[in-house]
Image (cartoon, rainbow, N blue to C red):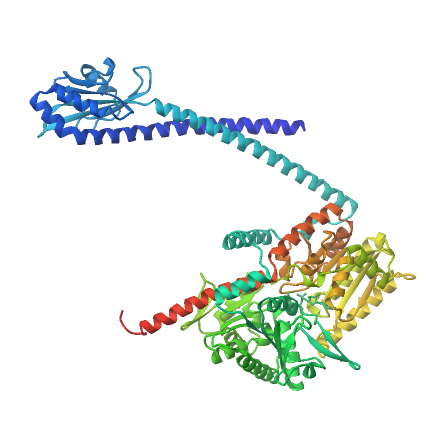
Amino acid sequence: MRKGARFLALLVVGLGLLTWAGQSIFTSKTRAWFDRDVELRDRLIVSTTQTQIVERLRTGDDRAIRDLLEAIIVDERIMAVAMCSDTGRTVAVSGPYPAAFGCSVLPSLKKMAGEIRDNGSYGLSTDLTGGPVHLGVYEIFEDDIHRGSVALLHDMSFVARRDRVMRNMLLVAFAILAVSAALVTLVAAQLSWRGFLRELRRVLRGGKAGPEFKPLLRDIRELAKTLAQETERDQGDLRWTPERLKRALKQHLEGERVIVVANRAPYIHEKRGAKIEVVHPASGLVTALEPVLRACSGVWVAHGSGSADRETADESGRIRVPPGDESYSLRRVWLSKEEEKGYYYGFANEGLWPLCHVAHTRPTFRAEDFAYYKQVNEKFAEAVVSEVDRDDPIVLVQDYHFALAPAMIRARLPKATILTFWHIPWPNAERFGICPWRQELVEGLLGSSIMGFHTQQHCNNFLESVDSFVESRIDRERNAVVQGARQSLVRPYPISIEWPVHWLDGMPSVADCKKEVFAQLGLKDDALLGVGVDRLDYTKGIEERLLAVERMLERFPKYIGRFTFVQIAAPSRTEIERYQALTETVERTVKRINERFGSGDYRPVILLREHHEPRSVYKFYRAARLCYVSSLHDGMNLVSKEFIAARDDLRGVLVLSRFTGAARELTEAVIVNPYDMDESSSALSFALDMPIEEQVERMRSMRALVSEFNIFRWAGRMLVDAAQLRRKDRIGGRLARAWPVGGTV
Ligand code: ADQ
């Protein structure tokens, strides 16, 4: 405490000295400015009265000269004026003209003046009369003959008054600054000291020190920049809601409906015996896009893959959704078994998916798969055309299943605004270059008005591929690809979830969710639960996650019998061998860990290998002490954001892989490298030991971010950017018509 007081005193003295030095410099500078102003004023007065002075000198009318001088001192800052003859005689004075500046002493005062002008005039700042004055002496000529001089005396005490006021203001400002700086520094020092002690204690306890769990500084800086830019662009109107999105669509794009093209439909009808059930698929794309369509209305064009999809739709494949609250149309596109195999399982998921993710699974490229891919893209482009009600519709093309569709839609609807979003990473050009159809894919995507990715890095990689594989000009300043008269903007739009999440409406309290989930899993009341929620996909790092749990139990045996990790894994792409192999490895690993650390009823890992409806997933999020997202590579990852949305009690810890797009935004998560078992097992134990206050602090901050950067903002930003582009294109079109290419203006 004493140290703090000494520091405070030093800071105040330092700033005091600074104030004094600053004020001295300020005073001398302002004096010079005032003197110059006064001289300018004098010259103006003399030049406007010179003719009259000369005339009156010529007639020898001293009284008339005095009248003239009296008129001059009407200016309140001019104390007195004297007219001296060329021999130094006083011709006339006005006001109480002091003898110290009389005509007879002017020659000696001239010697004290700093600068004498060519015509003999000069200015002098002095306080010969006890107060600060400025004397200006101006020589009067008639046809180059010297007639005398006019001496103007100014009262400069107002400068001293202003100086005093300024000095006081400076002192007060510096005092406030000094005290605030001292307080902020003291608080910061205290906090970092406490943080340092906490870290030290943790290291001594055996936990691994924190830096590895922390986000990269570059990411925080990047995030702060984005927040600042977004705030500036929004000018205070920060929160995007469904209503605001609807308004933006109407206002900026003169539209009310959008057409979404995506492989997966938001509602799938499945036969279960004699009953038909509606299933909400486990898909990040659907999670993100569905609230947008509910807000905007329009049509969602998707593959009709459910066993009861045909019988629930009309003869054109249309059905109104969401069931019970119909607000938009779902248009189902039917694919043959061969088309599904070649386009979906083949080129999209055995070719493009591993090509774009750095997860060490080799892509497989088959020419027949690509042929089906092309055919299905055509089919969807046709479906879009049959759904539009104008020649310039707004079409949102989604993901790597439809890289060729944008150019196909553009060919059919040249005026359409096509926004394509690539939900997975885009690799660097060298890696992308191994795809035999790299050029077709990039050209197909360039049919879009806007190409969106989650991160700037993916945008850069895409531009690099454009540069390497197609003829075009890249406008680096605007991040646009220009091909003749057409251009495509390439922009990062980090995706998110709706806020508030409608699945949480009427959700039981956290305590009740915990009771329900613990009963379902057969856990004791004091058990610590960790959760993982994913499609069973090798990019999600599920094997690595289980190994990290195993390593934690090995290194920190206090958790054996107490900690349980539940993995909710929706079967995905089960026709593909690599996915079948993954399922086997995961099941084998779970068995091994349970045999190694389980006993009696206690199972350290529970694998629920089935699809869960969203409300059930949210109950798990609410019941858990931690959520571990360990993706090896992930465009964004929405599970992390859903976990945050679920925790309105501000408890729970998110452990997040640094290889997700989300890690760039959720900097308060415990950030890890999922390949590093020591680091990730330490992170799990760190999360389980985290004090409640710290959990609350981190969760509050992440909730604030996700609530602002929600899915309505994601869609809104793209639509507003598209609207700008559309306006420019229209003006460009009009200009082209008015001034035909090659014509003269
Ligand atoms: P996905 O790879 O599908 O998305 P993610 O963003 O995590 O990954 O979304 C998964 C969604 O499926 C979540 O809404 C989750 O709740 C749900 N889900 C997962 N397992 C489930 C289960 N067993 N039962 C029911 N639901 C389950 C792709 C990209 C991501 C990107 C999204 C959106 O790979 O990087 O974040 O698109 O752009």
* Residue at left offset 75%, top offset 45%: 202
Q: Quadrant of the C terminus?
A: bottom left
Where is residue 271 drawn, in percent x and y?
A: 75, 80
Instruction: State the image coordinates of residue 311 (x, y, percent, origin top left).
Output: 69, 84
Q: Relative to 652, is 290 on the left or the right?
A: left
Question: Which image quarter has ligand 1?
Answer: bottom right
Residue extending furthest toward the right? 600
Q: Position of residue 537 (x, y in %)?
A: 71, 70
Camera-side residue of 740 and 502: 502
- Whether residue 264 is visible here, answered yes or no, is no
Residue 661 in sight = yes
Instruction: Tell me the quadrant of the picture where the N terminus can be found.
Output: top right
Left/right of residue 714 with respect to residue 113 in the rendered view: right
The image quadrant of residue 222 is: bottom right
Which of the pair 24/273 is nearer the observer? 273
**Which residue occupies 40% across, 73% down?**
484
Task: Say which of 601 and 134 sits in front.
Answer: 134
Q: Quadrant of residue 347?
A: bottom right
- Number of labelled discs? 0
The image shows residue 668, relative to residue 338, as above or below, that is: above
When asked about the image quadrant of residue 106, the answer is top left
Residue 437 at what x, y percent from top left? 55, 78
Q: Nearer the viewer, residue 7 or 46?
A: 46
- Quick check: 599 above or below 39? below
Residue farthest along the left direction in this orientation: 59
Decide if residue 742 is on the left or right side of residue 682: left
